[in-house]
Image (spheres, grey):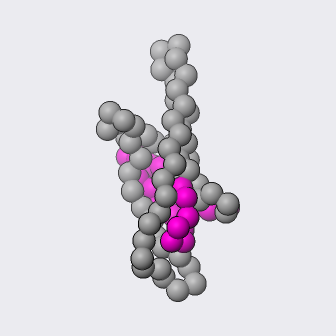
Amino acid sequence: MVFCFFLFLCALHSKAQKPGGGLKVSGIVKDIKGKVLPGATIRVLGTKSIALSTVSGDFSLTANSGDTLEVSYVGYES
């Protein structure tokens, strides 16, 4: 049994910002081999904003320009 933990930090860099609500950030969470990671947790650091990736790895949330996203995934392989 092998337990895997994937942690990825990504800084958001954008010049555009929606007034009063931040930016809509969306994407697909994949591992280093390109395999989608369903059920990954995507969080905007320093806020309560959180999203979970879908079965196809898709996610969407709102963040401000300059915010940092934390993506974590705990998996099990036998």
The picture places residue 54, in percent across and down from the top left corner, at 45, 49
Outermost residue, bottom direction? 19
Q: For the point 62% across and 62% down, which residue is it?
A: 49
Q: Is residue 20 above or below residue 72?
A: below
Tell me what residue is drawn at x 53 percent, y 13 percent.
1
Q: Nearer the viewer, residue 63 or 75?
A: 63
Q: Residue at x 58, y 84 (%)?
A: 20
Q: Was residue 67 drawn as part of the magenta stretch in this picture? A: yes
Query: How many dots with numbers?
Result: 0
Residue drawn at x 47%, y 80% is: 17
Q: Position of residue 78 (x, y in %)?
A: 48, 15
Q: Nearer the viewer, residue 11 or 27?
A: 11
Q: Answer above or below: position of 1 versus 45.
A: above
Q: Where on the picture, by quarter, is residue 64?
A: bottom right
Tell me, yes or no, if residue 8 can be seen here: yes
Question: Which stretch appears magenta?
Answer: 48-69
**Residue 40 seen by the camera:** no
Q: Up-down: is 55 above or below 75? A: below
x and y percent of residue 42 in the render? 54, 52
